[in-house]
Image (tube, rainbow, N blue to C red):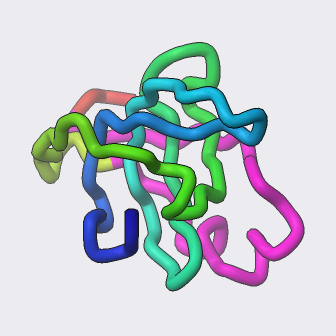
Amino acid sequence: MDKSAFKKDGHYAVTLRKPDGRLRPANLYVHRLEDAYMIARHTSGPDIGLLIKLDYDDVVKIVRTHPVLDRKRFMIPEAMLKPKLWETRTSMRAYSSAPGLGK
């Protein structure tokens, strides 16, 4: 996959290739797109809420895209998405809110 297949604030059901080569389904909410990677949040499964730095090559296939309503967008401070912060990390546990959901 490449950067043009994704949009900021998009919700995707994808097939990911894990480091050991196995394929795994995942639901992702994309927060930021960079040239070589994206910052996304797991929205289901055991890693729910985990922010990850994901290379585009790790996404094997986009299975489904979901529209995200303005009231259901996740809010994260821009400082947490800066490339400099992600130079040395691959994941971060962060809690955000969606104002329309009362959180």
Q: Is residue 1 visible?
A: yes
Q: Residue furthest top?
A: 46
Q: Is residue 99 visible?
A: no
Q: Is 91 placed left or right of 78 in the picture?
A: right
Question: Is the C terminus in the top left, top right, bottom left or bottom right quadrant?
Answer: top left
Q: Quadrant of residue 39?
A: bottom right
User: Which is nearer the eye, 16 or 11?
Assistant: 16
Residue 70: give x, y in percent of width and height. Answer: 15, 52
> Residue at 34% of width from left, 44% of height from top?
61
- Image height of 13 relative to 77, above or below: above
- Image height of 45 relative to 57, above or below: above
Q: Residue furthest right?
A: 88
Q: Is 1 placed left or right of 10 in the picture?
A: right
Q: Quadrant of residue 84?
A: bottom right
Residue segment shown in magenta: 74-100
Residue 72: give x, y in percent of width and height. Answer: 22, 41
**Magenta run includes residue 78:** yes
